[in-house]
Image (spheres, helix red, strand yellow):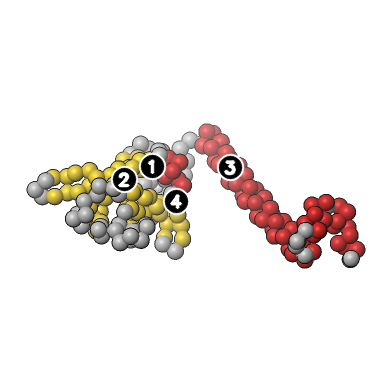
C-alpha cells in the first residue's frame, strides 16, 4: 500500500470505509475528487450570489443618497410593450397526438425595442373567439412575482420568460385555434402591458 493511501486511511475514516467496501481504491479516490469539485462549484456559486447581493445593497444605498435624474440627457429604459417569442404555441406534452399545453415565450421591450428584464405579475388567458358566439374563456393562470422571475430563460431559443398553461380536460376537440392573451403588471411602475396572439391547436 502506498504511503499516500496510508495517510488517507489514517486521516479520513470515511475514505477507509469506502476503500474497504466493494469499490477499488482508485474508484474511491475518483469519487472524492468528483465530490470535491462539486463542493468547489457550490462555493463559487454561493460567493457569486453574495457579490450580487452586496452590489444590490450598494445600489440601493446610492439611490437613497443621490437624487434621481443626476445624469444629464439619460433616458432610463422602461418596459413599454411585451411581445411573443417565435416559439410560442400549443404543445403535446405527453405525446398522445393532442396538444394539451400552451407555452408562451414573453419578451418585455423598452422604448428602444430592446429586451428588458422586469419584475412583474403575469396573467395568461386562453379564449375561444367565434363570430357567432363571442369570446369564451377556456383557461387562465396567474404567475405571481416569484414564479414569473423563475420563468426567466436565456439560451438557444432566445431570452424570454417561459410561461405554461395546461389546457382543460374538457377542451373542445373541434376547436382548431384559440387566442392567447398575456397581461403583465410591472412591479416597479404599476403599469399594465398586454399582448395577444392566435395559436393553432391540434386535437
View extreme (top): residue: 64
Q: CA distance from mark 2 to mark 1?
A: 8 Å
Dots 2 and 4: beta carbons under 8 Å?
Answer: no
Per the image, label 2 sits on a secondary structure element best described as strand
Please give the name of the residue rendered at 34% of the width and 48% of the height, measured from the top-left corner: 165
Please count the marks in the image: 4
View extreme (left): residue: 132
Residue 149: x, y in percent? 45, 45
Dots 3 and 4: beta carbons under 8 Å?
Answer: no
Residue occupied by mark 3: 53
Per the image, label 3 sits on a secondary structure element best described as helix
Count neighbours of disc 2 (C-alpha within 10 A) and say few if under 14, some if 14 to 19, many if 20 or more.
many
Q: CA distance from mark 3 to mark 4?
A: 19 Å
Please give the name of the residue rendered at 25% of the width and 47% of the height, measured from the top-left corner: 170
Please give the name of the residue rendered at 63% of the width and 47% of the height, measured from the top-left corner: 46
Q: Earlier in the sequence, mark 2 or mark 1?
A: 2
Dots 2 and 1: beta carbons under 8 Å?
Answer: yes
Q: Which mark is residue 182?
A: none
Q: Quadrant of the C terminus?
A: bottom left
Residue 2: x, y in percent? 89, 66
Front-lying residue, 88 or 27: 27
Q: Is residue 98 left or right of residue 34?
A: left
Residue occupied by mark 1: 143
Q: CA distance from mark 1 to mark 4?
A: 12 Å
Q: Earlier in the sequence, mark 3 or mark 2?
A: 3
Q: Quadrant of the N terminus?
A: bottom right
Please state which of the two labelled residues, at mark 1 or mark 3, is closer to the viewer.
Answer: 1
Image: 123 above or below 29: above
Q: Is residue 134 left or right of residue 164?
A: left
Residue occupied by mark 4: 152
Residue occupied by mark 2: 124
Front-lying residue, 141 or 41: 141
Amino acid at each position: 500500500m502506498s504511503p499516500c493511501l496510508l495517510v488517507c486511511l489514517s486521516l479520513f475514516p470515511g475514505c477507509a470505509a469506502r476503500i474497504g467496501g466493494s469499490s477499488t481504491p482508485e474508484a474511491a479516490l475518483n469519487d472524492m475528487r468528483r465530490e470535491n469539485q462539486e463542493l468547489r462549484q457550490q462555493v463559487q456559486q454561493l460567493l457569486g450570489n453574495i457579490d450580487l447581493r452586496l452590489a444590490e445593497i450598494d445600489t440601493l444605498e446610492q439611490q437613497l443618497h443621490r437624487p434621481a435624474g443626476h445624469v444629464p440627457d439619460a433616458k432610463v429604459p422602461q418596459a413599454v410593450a411585451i411581445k411573443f417569442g417565435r416559439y410560442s404555441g400549443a404543445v403535446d406534452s405527453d405525446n398522445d397526438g393532442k396538444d394539451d399545453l400552451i407555452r408562451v415565450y414573453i419578451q418585455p421591450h423598452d422604448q428602444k425595442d430592446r429586451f428588458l428584464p422586469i419584475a412583474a405579475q403575469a396573467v395568461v388567458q386562453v379564449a375561444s373567439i367565434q363570430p357567432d358566439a363571442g369570446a369564451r374563456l377556456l383557461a387562465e393562470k396567474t404567475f405571481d412575482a416569484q414564479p414569473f422571475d423563475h420563468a426567466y430563460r436565456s439560451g438557444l431559443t432566445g431570452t424570454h420568460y417561459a410561461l405554461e398553461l395546461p389546457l382543460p380536460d374538457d377542451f373542445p376537440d373541434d376547436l382548431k385555434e384559440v387566442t392567447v392573451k398575456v397581461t403583465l403588471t410591472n412591479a416597479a411602475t404599476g403599469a399594465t402591458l398586454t399582448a395577444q396572439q392566435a395559436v393553432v391547436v391540434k386535437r
